[in-house]
């Protein structure tokens, strides 16, 4: 039996009362559940100046990011990654929480949050005051040695990159998602990447790259929280990546109602009890 999912859109052609109705249904959903499992994606951070990856059909807007296998297997790939990151970090590292982050922090302050699971790597939920956060894909503000597992601060690493590559540090480029930048340079062979100061190992951002597995402990912790929740709320994610989609699929198997706020198609549209197609901050503006 097919189920008609309410999809409430805020396109310019709709009347103001339709937009208000969308927010009211979302408000009723949130206020009707006391233990919300919230999953967030890139749409939460676009108002903070961090570009997203996908269009409203869930397709790539730009070339897919580097894979784990490519990064680990080739020095040239690592040089290209860190050269672009040197430029991109300047803006990414200064990004500030926006109204969406602050609205979701209200849920925790109200005692309605079971946990917030984010696919983002920007740490902006925590900077907005959120405490019950699982960073599914890690944090870009940390650098990890792939040999000895030591972590170091990305801001400090930025200083070392700039000191070793002063000419590169003067370049400008258009911003890309997750601290990347679109450099026109084709030859990255002169870019100098420091090795781990403790063991000489390869240094990588402490985030899960495409082709890399999410640490089992994070998945298990999130699944345990999902078992305790009475509903799921998806905010700003197309769920096209399986690491996020699996939680919507698990919630559906548990019989939990799922509401989503996202502009455009998601991988889990058929699972939603409610979908609001509005910008995240607008849809959640009642949370103050």
Image (spheres, helix red, strand yellow):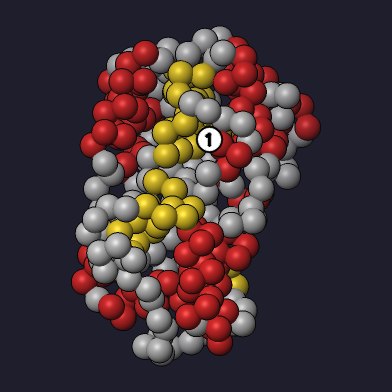
Residue underneath mark 1: 235
In the rendered image, the quadrant that contains the C terminus is top right
Task: Where is residue 185? Give x, y as percent.
Answer: 48, 87
Label 1 neighbour load within 10 Å: few <14, some 14-19, many 20+:
many
For the point 26% across and 28% down, which residue is it? 220
Q: Nearer the viewer, residue 8 or 120?
A: 120
Q: Is residue 37 visible?
A: yes
In front: 91, or 158?
Answer: 158
Query: As rendered, which of 107 and 232 lies closer to the eye?
Result: 107
Quarter containing the N terminus: top left
Q: Residue at x 49, y 43 (%)?
A: 41
Instruction: Determine the residue located farthest toward the front in the rendered image.
Output: 198
Q: Whole-percent x and y of residue 276?
A: 58, 32
Residue 102 point in image, percent of width and height: 66, 33
Q: Return the residue nearer the eye: 50 or 128.
A: 128
Decide: is 91 above or below 46: below
């Amino acid at each position: 039996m097919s189920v008609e999912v309410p999809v409430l859109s805020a396109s310019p052609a709709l009347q103001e009362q339709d937009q208000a109705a969308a927010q009211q249904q979302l408000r009723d959903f949130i206020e009707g559940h006391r233990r919300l499992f919230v999953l967030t994606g890139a749409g939460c951070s676009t108002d903070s100046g961090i570009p997203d990856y996908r269009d409203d059909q869930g397709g790539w807007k730009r070339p897919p990011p580097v894979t784990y296998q490519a990064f680990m297997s080739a020095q040239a790939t690592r040089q290209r990654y860190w050269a672009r990151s040197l430029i991109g970090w300047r803006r990414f590292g200064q990004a500030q929480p926006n109204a969406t982050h602050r609205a979701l922090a209200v849920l925790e302050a109200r005692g309605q949050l079971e946990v917030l699971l984010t696919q983002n790597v920007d740490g902006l939920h925590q900077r907005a005051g959120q405490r019950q956060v699982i960073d599914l894909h890690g944090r870009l503000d940390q650098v990890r040695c792939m040999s000895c597992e030591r972590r170091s601060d990305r801001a400090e690493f930025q200083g070392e990159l700039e000191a070793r590559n002063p000419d590169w540090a003067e370049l400008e480029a258009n911003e890309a998602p997750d601290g990347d930048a679109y450099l026109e340079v084709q030859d990255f062979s002169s870019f100098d990447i420091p090795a781990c100061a403790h063991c000489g190992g390869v240094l990588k951002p402490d985030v899960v790259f495409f082709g890399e597995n999410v640490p089992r402990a994070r998945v298990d912790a999130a699944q345990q929280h999902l078992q305790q929740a009475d509903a799921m709320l998806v905010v700003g994610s197309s769920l096209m990546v399986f690491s996020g989609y699996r939680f919507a699929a698990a919630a559906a198997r548990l019989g939990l109602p799922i509401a989503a706020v996202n502009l455009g198609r998601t991988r889990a549209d058929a699972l939603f009890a409610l979908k609001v197609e509005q910008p995240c901050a607008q849809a959640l503006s009642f949370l103050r």
